[in-house]
Structures are given as C-alpha cells and as structure tokens.
Amino acid sequence: MKRLFSLCALVSVVFASSISASAAVGANPEVQLTLATIEFQAGNFPKCRQMLNDLLKIDEANTTARELLAATQHQMKDDGAAAATYERLLKESKNPKGPYHFELAMIQYKQKKTDEARRHFELAQKANFNSGTSNFYLGVMDFSSKDWRNARNHLTASLAYVDGKPMESVTRYYLANAYVQLGKTDAAVHNYYEVKGEDSDSTDTSNKGIHAVTDAIRTNAIKELKALDVNQRYATLTLQQQFDSNVQSNPSEVDNAVAASQQKSGKSVLSVAAGYSSSPTRKIQITPAFNYSTNYNYNYLARTFNFMSFTPSLFMVYKPYARFSGGLKADGTLSMQNMLDPNESTRDLKYRPFSLTANAGPVMKYELTPRITLGGEAYWRPKRFYLDPATGTSRRSGGGVFGKLSADLVSGYTWWNPLLYVSFEWDHPAGTDFRMY
C-alpha cells in the first residue's frame, strides 16, 4: 500500500506540473516561441510548424515567429508556402528587408522564376545582405541568357565579398567562359588558372552542393586551358574612303603637331596588319606584329601630304595568366612622305623618308582585387625627322620619356566600369619649339 500511495503521489505531481506548464505556454508567447525553436533545432519540423501557426493565431504581429515559420516551411520543402510567408514579411515587417529578399530569391531561382529571382537578388545585394552570393546568382542568370558583359560584371563583383568565397571556383569558371565569349583570351586564361590552382580542401560545410562540383569544375578548367593552348596568327586589310576639310601635313603616327595644309580633299586610307601570338597559357608569350598604312589624297595640291608608314612591333610577357605579370614592349615606325626632289621636275613626286620613331620599355599588370586591375608602362621614345634643318629651334629630332599608371574597375553595373589613369610625358627634341613637359 505504501508503494502504491507513493506512485499515485508522483503521478499527481507530474500531472499538476504539466497543467502549470501548459498554462504558462498559453499565457506567454515567448515561451511558446522558445519551445518551437527547440523543436526546429531537433528537426521536428511538422510539430514546430503547428506550434508556430497556433502562436500566430493569437499574435499575428510576431515577426520572429513568422521568420521561423518561413524557415520551417523551407525545411519541409514547402517552397510555395515559404515564399508566401517571406512576401508577407516584406509587406508587414519593420526589420531590414535584405534577408527576406535573399531567401525569396533563392526559392524563386529554384522554381525557375528567373525574373522574380533577379529582382529580389538585386534588392538583397543593394541592402548589403549576402552580396557575394546574390551577385553570383545574378551572374549565372546573365550567363544563361548569354548576356556576357553583365555576367562578367556580376561574377567579378561576387569575388569581392566574403560570402562569395565558397563559390570561388565555380565563379571563376563561369567568369572565364564569359571572357572567352567577349574575346578576352588573356582574362579567360587567368581565371581558368585561378580555378586550376584553387585549394579544394575546405572546412566550410554550408555549401556542400557547391563543393561537390569543385573537382569537376577544376577538371573542365584544365580541359579549357588545353583548348586555349594554341598559337594564333592574324591578318587584316582595311580600305576607307574619307573627306578631309583640312588635310594633315603630318603622318597620323607622329605626335608633334604642325600647321595643317589648308587643303580640302577626298582620300583613301589603306591599312594592313599581320601578327602572331604564342599560346597565352605558356610562361612566356611572344607577340610580334607588323602594320602598314597609307593615305592617298585625290586633290593634286594635297598630294605632297600623302604618307605611308611601316610599324613592326614586339610584345613579350612573362606569365600572362598570373595575378601579376610583366614584360617588355617595343615598336618602331618609319614614315615616308610623297615629296618633290629639288633637282627633278615639279611633277616628279616620290616617297622619301619623313620620320623614324620608336617606343621601348617595360609593362606590368596586377590584379589588386577581382574588381580592380592595376597597370603600368614606361617607354623611351627616340625620334628622328629627316627634314630637320641643321640648326635652329624648329628641329624635332631628339628623344623623350612616357609613363602611365592605370586602374581598371569592373563594377556590378554595365554602365559603370571606369578606367582611371595618370600619365607623364617628357618630350625633348633638339629644337625648343616642340619641347613638351
């Protein structure tokens, strides 16, 4: 009898405690929300959803409960209900809207509602919430619609944010393919190499799906690099018909300005270019080229201003695909003018040397961040003008120096991709009339 009495007493105590707890829950929404959170953490999503629905019936303005309800619906793969809950939060909640836009965009992207997903990804990144991931998905959608330029802008922007780091291999791969479509082979090779060199080990488990494809992405990048490991040759020929209201008395390749001819003339301009470029995937890339151009003025009085120019050039760069690359660039131009010989008939016009100019010096490029590329170049510029007088201030032969530093910015917007630069030029010919500092 004593044992039976004790058992009855215990049951009575437990029953009384349960009644007290239920009363407390019914009277205190915070306690009910805490219990629902515990069920969510334990993975009991149906029970959690029921508790939250009951809570929201008596406290519709409970934003935290509605946020947890949206997350619960998403875990139960009820994306339609989760999307409706996030849309209601966007309308009613006074909290920052960035997280709601992002979660809604992810659901709509999964549902292949690309227009709606794009709008909410854009709003999320404008609110500075998961900007890296938002730009990543915007870039992928641009890529799928073959909008290569916007794809480049968004994918490059994704690389600048911490939350975009787990997708870096995939982002670089898409970015490389976008550069291929834009015809920017060097940038494409650089990004393929970044994919190839990525560290595949990661302790971040929040993007398992993305990490699962990293090895496959890297394998594809290596295949693309092999496809780009080719030497290229090119040749172009251009013929233009123009009218000049004041024919130049200098070849277009010569920087020093002199008075124009005061003659009007129709003219033809012929340009021929040919070159060779070794593989951009090798440690040293060599690019020799040759350009020829000439103009013909139909006005006989302007025919002494017919010029032809020959320009060989050579560009060598070490590791063009690397984050930092540098090399040497050199070119020279021989310009010839259709002119009279004082010892011959006035009708006897011949092409004779007019000027010989050159540029030679180092160049470099450095990717400061995925969105900012720095560049630098410096050249020595010797020049000789064959018609210079023996003495006097009008001599243009001499030498000079040119330097330039630049910063190329790729933003997340098509209309804002500025190139900033500062340059210095020191031109020191023998005569003082054409000196420039």
Image (spheres, grey):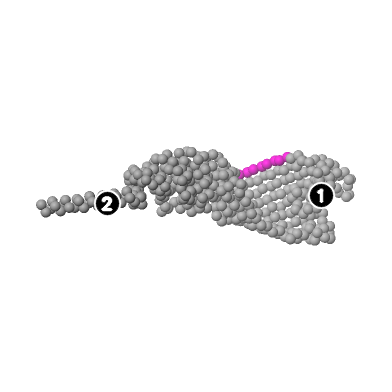
Q: Amino acid at mark 1?
A: Ala
Across and down, in percent, residue 426 comes to 72, 60
Callout 1 secondary element: loop
Above/below status of 116 relative to 131: above
Q: Which mark is residue 275?
A: none
Q: Which residue is mark 2?
A: 20
Callout 2 secondary element: helix
Q: Quadrant of the C terminus?
A: bottom right
Q: Amino acid at mark 2?
A: Ser
Across and down, in percent, residue 418 comes to 62, 51
Q: Main secondary structure of the magenta part?
A: strand
The magenta segment is: 227-239
Whether residue 230 appears in magenta in the rendering, the answer is yes
Q: Name the image quarter holding residue 265.
A: top right
Q: Name the image quarter holding residue 57.
A: top left
Across and down, in percent, residue 339 comes to 83, 47
Tell which of 128 and 307 is nearer to you: 128
Tell which of 346 and 58 is nearer to you: 58
Q: What residue is at 68 percent from the left and 50 percent from the top?
A: 313
The extreme left residue here reads 1
**Residue 140 shows in this picture:** no
Q: What residue is at 74 percent from the left and 40 percent from the top?
A: 240
Q: What residue is at 66 percent from the left and 57 percent from the top?
A: 422
- Viewer-side label of 1, 2: 2
Across and down, in percent, residue 312 comes to 69, 49
Which numbered disc, 1 or 2, marks the residue that appears first in the sequence? 2
Q: What residue is at 65 percent from the left and 54 percent from the top?
A: 329
Residue 290 left/right relative to 341 = left
Q: Which residue is mark 1?
A: 260
* Label 2: few (<14), some (14–19) or many (≥20) C-alpha neighbours in 10 Å: few
